[in-house]
Structure formats: C-alpha cells, structure tokens
Image (cartoon, grey):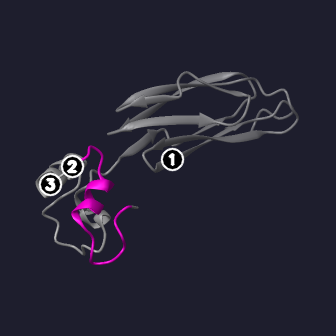
Amino acid sequence: MAVPNNYNFSLRDVANELPGGQSSLDECFREATSSKFDSRYQGSKNSLRNFRNYNNAPKVTLRVSPTSYLSRNNNAVAFNIRVTSNSSWQVTESVNWIRLSRTSGSGNGTVRVTLLQNTGRIGRYAYINFRANGVSFPFLVEQADDDDPRI
C-alpha cells in the first residue's frame, strides 16, 4: 500500500494509491468517491484505506432454493435450483457425476442439475458450491446406491 500506516501521509501518497494520476486534493477525492471511497467518513485517518465507509457498502445477498437435494433412488435425475442474488455469482461442483446447466449468472436465475445414474454399491454425496463476492453457500446432494435404492 502506498499510503504509510501512520498519521502522516502526503497528497502524493494518496494520489499514488488511486488510479488516474491526480495532482490535487480535489481530484484525489473525486476519484476516491467514484471508487466507493467516502470523503465524509470521520473514522481514523491513519491510512487511505480508512477513507472507505465500510458500514455503507452494499451487502451481497445469495440464497438458493431448495437448500439441498436427496435422491431416494439410484436413477439419473434432474432438478432445478433457484438462485436469488443482488450480485453476480458462480457455481461449481467437483465430482464427475453431477452436470450443471450453467456455472455463473447475475441477479436471479436457475441452475439445472443432472445427477448421472449411480451404479456403485454405496450411496454418494457431494456439494455444489455457490459463491457471490465473498458470500458462499454449499448445496448438499445425496444419491442412493445400486444395491439399496432407499436411503
């Protein structure tokens, strides 16, 4: 960080921290405000980072529905997950028996999940992970085995 972590920093330190090449304090604050810095913030000024008013930052929401899925038989099956968010989001899975119709979106959307048939002798489970700007939601998927299609 260009701004030293003390009470004495210069206009040049501030200008170096912000993109653009500002040469006056007014230009620095205009650029800082457009970068979601709040020049009116009255907290500690021991580093440029403290010009951000984190209490007023928009909160990221991420909800999925349903919150888990249980397949009581071993057949291939497909279902939908509804995503509600005020941000862009990503979805990942880490097993080869789950297929996702999409891996990202923005705002509200739907992800179609397909579970391939379980031909093994044990039930299986995995997590599908939804993420949006630091917020995450693990979605549990369980599927019965070939020997006993009842979980």
Quadrant containing the N terminus is: bottom left
Q: Earlier in the sequence, mark 3 or mark 1?
A: 3
Is 80 on the left-hand or right-hand side of 122? left
- Determine if the magenta segment contains residue 38: no
Q: Nearer the viewer, residue 40 or 27?
A: 27
* Residue position for label 2: 22
Mark 2 in CB contact with mark 1 (< 8 angstroms):
no
**Residue 151 in sight from this viewpoint:** no
Residue 24's tag is: 3
Quadrant containing the C terminus is: top right
Amino acid marked by disc 3: Ser
* Residue position for label 1: 137
Amino acid marked by disc 2: Gln
Q: CA distance from mark 2 to mark 1?
A: 41 Å
Q: Is residue 59 above or below residue 47?
A: above
How far across and how far down the image is residue 149, in percent? 78, 32
Q: Tag count in the figure?
A: 3
Residue in the picture at 24% in, 63% down: 51
Q: Main secondary structure of the magenta part?
A: loop
User: Which quarter of the figure has residue 143?
Assistant: top right
**Which residue extends farthest bottom?**
7
